[in-house]
Image: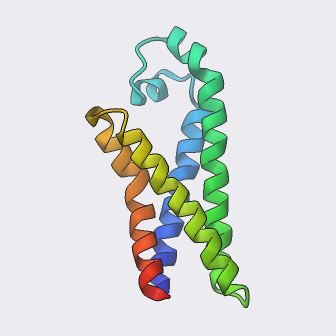
Amino acid sequence: MAIVASLFAGLAALVHVYIFVLESIRWRQPATWKIFGLSSQADADTTAPLAYNQGWYNLFLAIGAAVGVILLWTDARQPGYALVFLAVGSMLAAALVLLSTGRSRLRAAAVQGTFPLLALIFMALSL
């Protein structure tokens, strides 16, 4: 079960690195701001500082999950579990917060939260 949990935590990390790229690097590109429902370059420019900050949060969560997965397979197994639980638990909580903003965000919340949820389930089963 720990292998499956590690796989899902790694996939969650990769999704959050991708979100970082969208929010912190590519935000002002029309293809990107359209993904997030913005209707103009002016809107993208106005919200860019918020997206930039949010993107870094996503990257830090991804790093936490990745380091936790690495630690799971060393002598530091218990700190690895703690770090993975914290990182993917935060990812899942953020997805639930996103979903709380409206049903129109269901797809985005599912993309953001499915791998973390599966990682948490399999982590709990592997204890």
Residue 112 located left or right of residue 54: left
Is residue 7 shown above or below 125? above
Hey, which residue is sitting farthest left in the picture? 103
- Residue 7 is situated, as x and y percent measured from the top left of the image, at 48, 74
- Which residue occupies 56% across, 69% down? 85
Q: Residue at x 28, y 33 (%)?
A: 104
- Residue 22 x, y percent position in the rendering: 54, 37
Q: Quadrant of residue 92?
A: bottom left
Q: Position of residue 48 (x, y in %)?
A: 61, 22
**Res 66 → quadrant:** bottom right
Can the viewer see residue 25? no
Whether residue 117 sits left or right of residue 22 in the image: it is: left
- Quadrant housing the N terminus: bottom left
* Observer-nearest of 88 and 3: 88
Quarter occupied by residue 120 = bottom left
Kindly identify the residue that appears in the image at 46 percent across and 87 percent down.
126
Q: Residue at x 48, y 84 (%)?
A: 3
Residue 14 seen in the current view: yes
